[in-house]
Image (tube, rainbow, N blue to C red):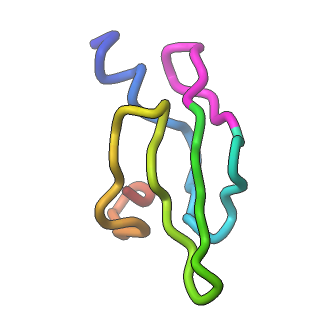
Amino acid sequence: IDFVQYHVVPGTWFSEGLVDGQYLPTLYDKEIKVSVSTDGFSRTINFVNGDIRVVKANVPLLNGVA
């Protein structure tokens, strides 16, 4: 269960509200760092903690967003 809690951030965070270098708290009392880049036309979430690539953001779920 610790593994899952480390990767879950409480609340609902859409990519538009994230800032490059922002840290988000996890349910495991750790933080993950968000990296955001823009190309002048769109915002892309590139990496979380430098090792996970987000390929699709803002996927609505019943209990939040992925």
**Lateral position of residue 12 relative to residue 58, left or right:** right
- Magenta range is 23-32
Please state the horizontal and vertical placement of residue 55, each as a whole percent of the image.
Answer: 29, 61
Residue 24 spot, x, y in % from top left: 64, 35
Asked if the magenta segment contains residue 27, the reply would be yes
Above or below, 14 against 35 in this view is below
Is residue 8 found left or right of 1 in the rendered image?
Answer: right
* Place of residue 2 in the rendered image (x, y in percent of width and height, measured from the top left): 34, 10
Seen at 30% across and 15% down, the residue is: 3
State the residue at coordinates (33%, 48%): 53
Quadrant in which the C terminus is drawn: bottom left
Q: In the picture shown, does residue 64 fall above or below 8?
A: below
Above or below residue 9? Residue 19 is: below
**Apparent side of residue 21 relative to residue 9 in the rendered image (left or right):** right
**What is the quadrant of residue 39 in the picture?**
bottom right
Residue 16 placed where, x, y %? Answer: 63, 71
For residue 65, what is the image quadrant?
bottom left
Q: Is residue 52 above or below residue 36?
A: above
Quadrant of the image occupied by residue 57: bottom left
Q: Is residue 25 left or right of residue 6?
A: right
Task: Name the quadrant of the N terminus.
Answer: top left
* 54 in magenta: no
Q: Residue at x 69, y 51 (%)?
A: 20
